[in-house]
Image (spheres, rainbow, N blue to C red):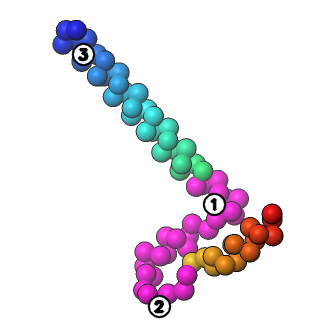
Amino acid sequence: MDQETLLTIQGYAKFFLILAVFIVFYSYAFSIYRRDKKGERDFEKYSNLVHDDAIESDPLEDRNKEEKNKEKEK
């Protein structure tokens, strides 16, 4: 192959790679937005973790409670 063909293929590959990354990123951002609006998960408490990350801080989620809920659903 000549150099012009390789550059054309490289250009198309970069375009489709960037397009795929763009679609994945916005799909993830939309899913976070949707879960926050539905109330499935409160992302505010995770953002507050940056400011309150001392070892003495309370856990954000009670894992025992979640495990019991999963057992009840079965």
Q: Amino acid at mark 2?
A: Glu
The residues tagged by marks 1 and 3 sit, at their Cα atoms, a distance apart of 45 Å
Of pointers 1 and 3, the one earlier in the residue sequence: 3
Residue at numbered disc 1: 36
Q: Secondary structure at mark 1?
A: helix
Direction top: furthest residue: 1
N-term-proximal mark, 2 vs 1 = 1
Task: Label 3: state its secondary structure.
Answer: helix
Give the magenta range.
Answer: 32-59
Q: Quadrant of residue 59?
A: bottom right
Q: At which x and y percent is residue 16?
A: 41, 27
Mark 2 or mark 3: name the one nearer the start of the chain: 3
Residue 4, horizontal then vertical, whole percent:
21, 11
Disc 1: CA contacts within 10 A as few (<14), some (14-19) or many (>=20): some
In the image, 65 versus 29, the foreground residue is: 65
Q: Which residue is mark 2?
A: 56
Residue drawn where x is 56% and y is 70% of the image: 44
Mark 2, secondary structure of its residue:
loop
Q: Is residue 50 left or right of residue 73?
A: left
Is residue 70 placed above or below 8 in the rendered structure? below
Pointer 3: what residue?
6
Q: Is residue 73 left or right of residue 47?
A: right
Q: Is residue 52 a member of the stretch shown in magenta?
A: yes
Which residue does the image show at 57% across and 78% down from the upper left?
A: 60
Name the residue: 65% across, 57% down: 35
Position in image of residue 24 (x %, y %) = 49, 41
Residue 28's x, y, as percent?
Answer: 54, 48
Taking 64 as reference, is 40 above or below it?
above
Instruction: Single out the mark in the foreground, 2 or 1.
Output: 2
Image quadrant occupied by the C terminus: bottom right
Q: Name the quadrant of the N terminus.
A: top left
